[in-house]
Each structure stands twice: as structure tokens, then as C-alpha cells.
């Protein structure tokens, strides 16, 4: 017995099993529903631990833990009930103020738990399936999707949370496949399973995804409940099949269009396939014959090359192609083995008609005779040497130039007839010419009478069958040309004097069309000092040493195109010093024709590093000022927000407490005049209310809480109404949206600009109408417009002190990368327009 009147009867009347336990879990009392749950032996449980009846140790520990808590949470545990089955029981705890211990209402939640386990198994299977799985409802919206399906949607640019997701996914399907997809979906929604393949555009790359999709209708109690979709990405298989077809097409194209004859044959030398070139070579259809019937090895036994092909897998050589009329054509062949039809060995042989090549070799021999004729008749002096540089032959022009007969020079070392100062150059060029053509070099050579003459010589190797057999040297007399060059040198010295003493860097280089890789002809000391190179280093390395433009730089390509078109350029470029430092320079370049006929580019440049540094520091200084101004505004806003919070929370709480105390005084009995005391208290209550209203107005002035509570649109509505109430000016607020979900910085700046503009209207404008417009402009730009029809003002004559408010508005908008424009004329009102670009803000 519980000893509490009515409690026991109340517990017995409850339909759910109820137990009263002490803190140790000992059963103190149970109603009839509990005995029915645990069976006939349940009566013996009174005085015993109900917790120990759970077979699960973890559940028992969880029940003990909750019993020890002041406010225990519901616990679900497993118990063995009357029929011996394992059931899931939920303990919903309660306490009764008249009973000791704690009460528990036991609810059988076995079916809910089993259903949850089934759902978990379903989710585990679906989420771990590599194919994309989706469940479509009767309204053709997604009911469920696995991870693979979400990845597929992400690849096609479809938001899985969007209600229009299926429609957007359908739009991504190739137009050619859409009709088939519609038929398959209609079949599924009419109770028929369907399978299809279609392509869908991918946002990750240019290639479309190819999907193999199975759609199965799902019926519950005979009615269509949903459609189950299983999608497998077969893009790779589709691509491999396409590549295989392309590979076969390429092989077929090469096979059919090859200029060489190609035969494919089996182990019995039976021809399986032949290309058109083979039919042309043999003047018949090779497919009707064997390889042995078409090819004649000549002196070589046919089994010889055939056995080599079978053993080595490859074979090369020459054969004769037999013609139906008995003729023979010399051919060069290349044969190879491969795994062919049904895994058997197969062979291919390529045949090339070499009759023209043999004819060319004959003609080459004839050309040797022509070379001898040209050698003798050449107007330039020509010398032939052996690989060691010993003279072998000279032509008639050389005899006239040097005065030596060929027999007098034969066997002499060619550099012996040059000046001692040119000996090394002659030796080096002769050695270089033994392997490759040497560049033109200038030497002084001695004539038979002892006279010296200047010649330009160029050497080239004589190669026969890939082996160097000598050197050919062609010589041109340039003695008169050298004299002219010396006269030109005097003129160049005058020009060089001006260049050498210039303070700007001057570089002359050959105009090759590529400014970044041109041969440097000369550089003055100023250029060497600025770039850190010597003139010799610049001449050897060319412009690539100091000019390294980015090939992707569109500006450089535009400059290069303009320079090629006009031959002039003035502007800024970037050069590289020898120590690896980038050097900004101001360049003036022009092109002129050099004395040797080459186009020469003259580049004058000046180091502008210091100038750019000053400009950069000036920009940084301005940015610092803007940053300080921004920080000042941020600090002021934070201080105002803090002060508003203090006034609203602390002062408001104190005033409310005073008001409560006054209310208590009203209810206290007193021998004093009740009416007099009540009147005094009512006066005090009025003053307290006035103080509270004042604190709210102060808080609103320092930091408008309306921005945080009701957003920018509501805050502006409150602000313009306050303006109208205090100024009496008719006012209108125009909104493109009911609310703008903007960042705190943007909302605060917009509110302050409206507040400052309305303050100026109230103080100076003498307007009879004010319009405030908030709108979304060009989708990603927030636009703010305040107009009045007041007296206006002269912007040029505005005093600096009177423009602080406008400067503040401009700085607020500028900190948000926005733009503020003020338009006003005397007698024609004022128009303030602010536009703020939005990056992450959202409109509703």
C-alpha cells in the first residue's frame, strides 16, 4: 500500500504499465497493466530490482544513471515479457509530490524500434550502393536520394534541395534523348518497369555523362506509391566503345589510304585482306592468291624470309612483286606478326615500290659529274680539303684570286695561307666545318706575290653515305668592302660618343619580330649600369637576358603588334636586372635600317623604380587613411551599440523593479490617507514611465535596434515616420522588396546614409516632399535614393565644414566599394544616390 489516498486507484486506472521505484531501482508498487506485461510471476517483483530484469548490461547501466539524476530523461531498454519475447520498453519518468521514490510509465515501443532498424538497414544499403539511387513521389519530386545520386546531381549542376530539381535535371538531358526519357518515365508511372540510356550535360567538363537507368514502380496496397530509379554511370564504357570504333576507323582509314601496299595473311600465307595500293601494285585482286604467288625473292630462297618472320616476329628486306603479265617490280618490304583471328597467328606485310628510288640513285651518280662541272665554273673561289684540312683541289676562280695553281697548293694545310692573327679562327672554323656548316667568317689570306687580301669564307662538310670525306670552303674577296667599313667606323665613333655619354640606357638590337629574343648589337654604359650586365654579356646573351615578358600577357602582345605595325613605341615595360630584380622602366623604341640592310631597333629606357615607389607609397597612404576612417566608424558603431544595450537592459530593468515596488506599496494597508498616497504613487509611476521611454529613445538614437529586430526596410520605415512626426514634411518610402537580407555592414551604412540625408533635409532644405527608395538594381547592386523638392544648394560653393555629413556618407559607401552621387542646384531640390555592389548578400 502506498499510504496516499487516491494514488493507488489512480495508478490502477491508467492503461499503461506504471511502476514506482526507489532510487536503487527497487519496485515499490505496480499497477495491473504492469503485471499483465510481465506475466504471473510479476507479483514477486515487488521489493526486487526492476532494472535487473533487462538482459542488456548497457541498458541496465543507463537506467541506473537516469535514476540518480534529479530530472531523469526517458530511457528505452530491452526486457523479457510474459510470452518470453524480447520487447523494447521506454521508461517515461515522473514524480508525485505525495509519494516517495520516482514513478515510471512503461511504453512498449518495439514496433517503432524495429521500424527504425529497418530504416537504418535500408539507408545503409542505399548509401553504400555505387549506383545512383533516387525515389520519386507521385508528384515527380524526389523523396529520397543516396550519396551517389547527390554526386550525380552535383556533376550536372542541379541543387538536390531545390523543388524544381527533377525539372532542371531533365533540362540538362541531351535534346536527342529527352523524348525517350519522357516515355520511360510515363511507363514507370503507369506501372511498367523501363530501362533506358541517355546523355546529360556535365558542369565539370565539356564531356556529357552517359547514364544507364532502370525505373521500377513501387506499389503499396495495390496503389502506385513512388518510382524507384537506379542510375549507373556508363560514361567510361561509352567512351571506350567510341574510342574503339574510332580506333577501328583510323586503322581502316590508314589501311585503305596508305600509299604503301599492305597485305594481311594467315599461317598458310593465304591473303585475308589487301588495301587498294596492293591491288594497284599487283594489278590484280590479291585476295584470290597467296603471298608465295605474289612475291619473288629473286636470288634469296622464299622460305628464308618466311622462316625469319615466323621465328623473330619481324622481317625486312627487298623482294620482287610479280605482275599478271609476267613483269616484276622491285619492292622494299617490312613484315610483322600479330595475334589475329580466333587467337591464331597472323601477319602483315607492307610493300613499297622502290623502282623510282633505284632510278634516283642512278641519277645521283650522274649529278656527281654535274657537280664537277659547276665546281670549275663557279665565280667564287672554292677549295676542297680532306678531313684533316689538307687542300685537295681548287677551282679556276681561286687560282685567279690567289695566283697559286692547284698543284702548288695541293697537300698544304689550308690555314697556312692566312695571317698569323687569323690562324686560330681558321683552324676552329675548319674543324667545325668537318661536322656541320660553319657561319661566314672573315680572314686575311696571302697571295702568291706576298700581297694580303681580305676574304669572307664559309665552310661546309662533304658527306658521302653518312660519312664526312672532306670540307668545301667558298671564298669571296671583300678587300674593298673592308675599306668602306673602316670609313663607316669613323662615322660610328661620332654617334657612339653621344650614346656613351647619355644618362638614359640605350640598347641597339636586331629587329627579329621578337623583342624578347633578339641579338643585341650595342649597349651604352648607362644601360649596363642600370641592368647590371657588361656590354659583352648583353651582346652574347641578347635581349632575353633582361626582357622576359609573359606569353599570356595580352597587354604585351598588343604592344608588340602596335610596335610591328608602326615601328614606334613609348610606354612602360618591365626589365630584369642581372641580380634577378624586376626593374620598371619607361621605354621609347624605334626601328631603322642598318648599314648591313638589317632592321635595327633602338631602345632608350629610364629606370622609374623611384617614381613608382613614390606613387605606391602615396596610394598606401591614402589606403591607410581610408582604413583609419573605417576603423573610426566601426569603433563608434560598437560604442553606440554597447551604450544602447546598457541603457536598454540595465536602466530598463531598474525602472521596472521600481515600478513593481510601487505596485506593492499600493497594496499595503496603512492608517494614512489612502487617496493621497495613491495619488503620489500614480505621479511617481508616470515619471518612471517617462524615464523608461526616454531611455528607449536614447538607445534608438545611438544604435537603431530596429535594424537588428525588423531589418533595413522596417528600420527605414520607422526612421522616415519619426522624421515626418518631428518635421511635418510629407514623406514616402518605396521598396522593391518587402525586406532585404543584407550583411550588417551594408544595412548599417544604408541606414546611416538615409538618417544623415533626412537630417540635412530637416535642417536646410525647407522641402514639402521627401521620397526614399530602396531597390535591387542590376541584380547584384543595392541602390539607395533620397530626393526632396527643397531649396537645394551650390555644390561648388559648399563650405568644408558644411560638407562633413556628405563626406561621411561617401566614406561609408566607399568602404563597401560603392559609389555615392549628390545632385543639387539652388531652388531645384537635392538628389542623393548610393549604389553598393553585393557579393554574398541575399534578397528576399
Image (cartoon, grey):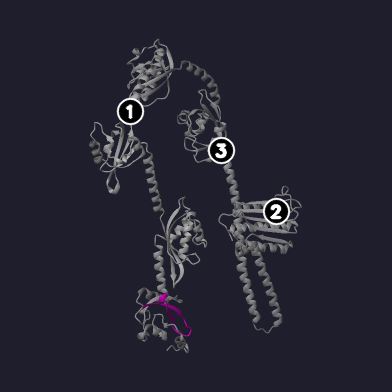
* Mark positioned earlier in the residue sequence (1 or 3): 1
Mark 3 to mark 2 CA distance (whole Å):
44 Å
Q: Is residue 598 visible?
A: yes
Identified at 33% across, 30% down, the residue is 355
Find out whether residue 104 is within the magenta segment.
yes
Q: Which mark is residue 610?
A: 3
Categorize mark 3 by other alpha carbons within 10 Å: few (<14), some (14-19), many (20+).
Answer: few
Question: Residue beneath label 2, please?
Answer: 831
When asked about the image quadrant of residue 468, the answer is: top left
Identified at 38% across, 74% down, the residue is 59
Q: Secondary structure at mark 1?
A: helix
When asked about the image quadrant of residue 774, the answer is: bottom right
Q: Which mark is residue 39?
A: none
The residue segment tinted magenta is 86-111
* Mark 1 or 3, closer to the camera: 1
Mark 1 to mark 2 CA distance (whole Å):
94 Å
Q: Give the position of the N terminus as an image quadrant.
A: bottom left
Q: Are marks 3 and 2 in contact (CB under 8 Å)?
A: no
Residue 543: x, y in percent?
A: 48, 32
- Seen in the picture, residue 39 relative to 782 is either above or below; the reply is below
Q: Are marks 1 and 2 in contact (CB under 8 Å)?
A: no
* Mark positioned earlier in the residue sequence (3 or 2): 3
Residue 787: x, y in percent?
A: 70, 56
Q: Give the position of the C terminus as an image quadrant.
A: bottom right
Categorize mark 1 by other alpha carbons within 10 Å: few (<14), some (14-19), many (20+).
Answer: few
Question: Residue beneath label 1, please?
Answer: 358
752 with respect to 118 (left or right): right
* Mark 1 or 2, closer to the camera: 1
- Seen in the picture, residue 223 relative to 712 is either above or below; the reply is below
Q: Is residue 214 visible?
A: no
Q: Secondary structure at mark 3?
A: helix
Amino acid at each position: 500500500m502506498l499510504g496516499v489516498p487516491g494514488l493507488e486507484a489512480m495508478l490502477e486506472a491508467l492503461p499503461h504499465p506504471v511502476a514506482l521505484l526507489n532510487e536503487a531501482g527497487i519496485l515499490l508498487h505496480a499497477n495491473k497493466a504492469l503485471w499483465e506485461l510481465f506475466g504471473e510471476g510479476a507479483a514477486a517483483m515487488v521489493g526486487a530490482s526492476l532494472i535487473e530484469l533487462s538482459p542488456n548490461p548497457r541498458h541496465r547501466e543507463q537506467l541506473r544513471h537516469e535514476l540518480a539524476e534529479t530530472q531523469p530523461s526517458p530511457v528505452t531498454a530491452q526486457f523479457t515479457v510474459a510470452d518470453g519475447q524480447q520487447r523494447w520498453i521506454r521508461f517515461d519518468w515522473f514524480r508525485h509530490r505525495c509519494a516517495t521514490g520516482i514513478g515510471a510509465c512503461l511504453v512498449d515501443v518495439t514496433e517503432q524500434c524495429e521500424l527504425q532498424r529497418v530504416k537504418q538497414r535500408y539507408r545503409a544499403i542505399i548509401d553504400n550502393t555505387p549506383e545512383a539511387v533516387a525515389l520519386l513521389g507521385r508528384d515527380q519530386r524526389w523523396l529520397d536520394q543516396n550519396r551517389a545520386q547527390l554526386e550525380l546531381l552535383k556533376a550536372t549542376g542541379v541543387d538536390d534541395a531545390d523543388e524544381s530539381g527533377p525539372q532542371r535535371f531533365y533540362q540538362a538531358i541531351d535534346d536527342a534523348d529527352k523524348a525517350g526519357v519522357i516515355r520511360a518515365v510515363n511507363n514507370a508511372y503507369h506501372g511498367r518497369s523501363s530501362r533506358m540510356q541517355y546523355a546529360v550535360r556535365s558542369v565539370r567538363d565539356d564531356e556529357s555523362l552517359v547514364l544507364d537507368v532502370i525505373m521500377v514502380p513501387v506499389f503499396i496496397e495495390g496503389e502506385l506509391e513512388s518510382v524507384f530509379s537506379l542510375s549507373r554511370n556508363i560514361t567510361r564504357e561509352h567512351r571506350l566503345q567510341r574510342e574503339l570504333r574510332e580506333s577501328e576507323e583510323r586503322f581502316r582509314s590508314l589501311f585503305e589510304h596508305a600509299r604503301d601496299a599492305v597485305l594481311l595473311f594467315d599461317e598458310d600465307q593465304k591473303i585475308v585482306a589487301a588495301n587498294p595500293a596492293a591491288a594497284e601494285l599487283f594489278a590484280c585482286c590479291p585476295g584470290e592468291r597467296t603471298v608465295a604467288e605474289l612475291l619473288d625473292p629473286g636470288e634469296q630462297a622464299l622460305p628464308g624470309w618466311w622462316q625469319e618472320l615466323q621465328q623473330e616476329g619481324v622481317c625486312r628486306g627487298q623482294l620482287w612483286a610479280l605482275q599478271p603479265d609476267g613483269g616484276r617490280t622491285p619492292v622494299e618490304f617490312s613484315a610483322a606478326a600479330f595475334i589475329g583471328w580466333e587467337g591464331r597467328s597472323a601477319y602483315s606485310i607492307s610493300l613499297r615500290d622502290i623502282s623510282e628510288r633505284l632510278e634516283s640513285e642512278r641519277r645521283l651518280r650522274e649529278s656527281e659529274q654535274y657537280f664537277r662541272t659547276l665546281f670549275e665554273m663557279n665565280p667564287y673561289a672554292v677549295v676542297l680539303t680532306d678531313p684533316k684540312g689538307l687542300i685537295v683541289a681548287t677551282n679556276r676562280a681561286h687560282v685567279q684570286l690567289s695566283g697559286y695553281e692547284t698543284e702548288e697548293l695541293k697537300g698544304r694545310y689550308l690555314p697556312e695561307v692566312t695571317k698569323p692573327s687569323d690562324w686560330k679562327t681558321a683552324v676552329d672554323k675548319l674543324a667545325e666545318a668537318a661536322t656541320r656548316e660553319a657561319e661566314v667568317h672573315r680572314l686575311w689570306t696571302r697571295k702568291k706575290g706576298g700581297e694580303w687580301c681580305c676574304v669572307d669564307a664559309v665552310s661546309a662538310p662533304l658527306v658521302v653515305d653518312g660519312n664526312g670525306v672532306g670540307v668545301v670552303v667558298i671564298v669571296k674577296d671583300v678587300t674593298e668592302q673592308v675599306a668602306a667599313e673602316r670609313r663607316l667606323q669613323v662615322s660610328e665613333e661620332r654617334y657612339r660618343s653621344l650614346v656613351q655619354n647619355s644618362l638614359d640606357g640605350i640598347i641597339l638590337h636586331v629587329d627579329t619580330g621578337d623583342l624578347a629574343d633578339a641579338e643585341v648589337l650595342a649597349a651604352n654604359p648607362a644601360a649596363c649600369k642600370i641592368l647590371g650586365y657588361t656590354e659583352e654579356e648583353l651582346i652574347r646573351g641578347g635581349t632575353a637576358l633582361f626582357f622576359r615578358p609573359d606569353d599570356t600577357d595580352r597587354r604585351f602582345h598588343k604592344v608588340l603588334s602596335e610596335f610591328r605595325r608602326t615601328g614606334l613605341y613609348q610606354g612602360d615595360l618591365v626589365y630584369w636586372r642581372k641580380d634577378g630584380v624586376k626593374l620598371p622602366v619607361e621605354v621609347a623604341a624605334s626601328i631603322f635600317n642598318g648599314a648591313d640592310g638589317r632592321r635595327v631597333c633602338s631602345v632608350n629606357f629610364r629606370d622609374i623604380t623611384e617614381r613608382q615607389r613614390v606613387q605606391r607609397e602615396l596610394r598606401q597612404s591614402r589606403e591607410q587613411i581610408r582604413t583609419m576612417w573605417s576603423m573610426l566608424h566601426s569603433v563608434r558603431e560598437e560604442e553606440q551599440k554597447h551604450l544602447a544595450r546598457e541603457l536598454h537592459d540595465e536602466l530598463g530593468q531598474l525602472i521596472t523593479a521600481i515600478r513593481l515596488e510601487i505596485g506593492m506599496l499600493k497594496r499595503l494597508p496603512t492608517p494614512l490617507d489612502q487617496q493621497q498616497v495613491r495619488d503620489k504613487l500614480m505621479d511617481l509611476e508616470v515619471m518612471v514611465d517617462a524615464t523608461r521611454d526616454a531611455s528607449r529613445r536614447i538607445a534608438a538614437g545611438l544604435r537603431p535596434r530596429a535594424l537588428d529586430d525588423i531589418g533595413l526596410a522596417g528600420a527605414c520605415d520607422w526612421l522616415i515616420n519619426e522624421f515626418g512626426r518631428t518635421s511635418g514634411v510629407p514623406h514616402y518610402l518605396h521598396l522593391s522588396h518587402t525586406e532585404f537580407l543584407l550583411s550588417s555592414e551594408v544595412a548599417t551604412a544604408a541606414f546611416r546614409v538615409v538618417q544623415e540625408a533626412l537630417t540635412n533635409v530637416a535642417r536646410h532644405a525647407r522641402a514639402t516632399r521627401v521620397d526614399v527608395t530602396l531597390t535591387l538594381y542590376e541584380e547584384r547592386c543595392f541602390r539607395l535614393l533620397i530626393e526632396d523638392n527643397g531649396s537645394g544648394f551650390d555644390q561648388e560653393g559648399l563650405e568644408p565644414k558644411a560638407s562633413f555629413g556628405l563626406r561621411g556618407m561617401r566614406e561609408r559607401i566607399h568602404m563597401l566599394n560603392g559609389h555615392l552621387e549628390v545632385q543639387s542646384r539652388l531652388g531645384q531640390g537635392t538628389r542623393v544616390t548610393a549604389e553598393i555592389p553585393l557579393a554574398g548578400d541575399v534578397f528576399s
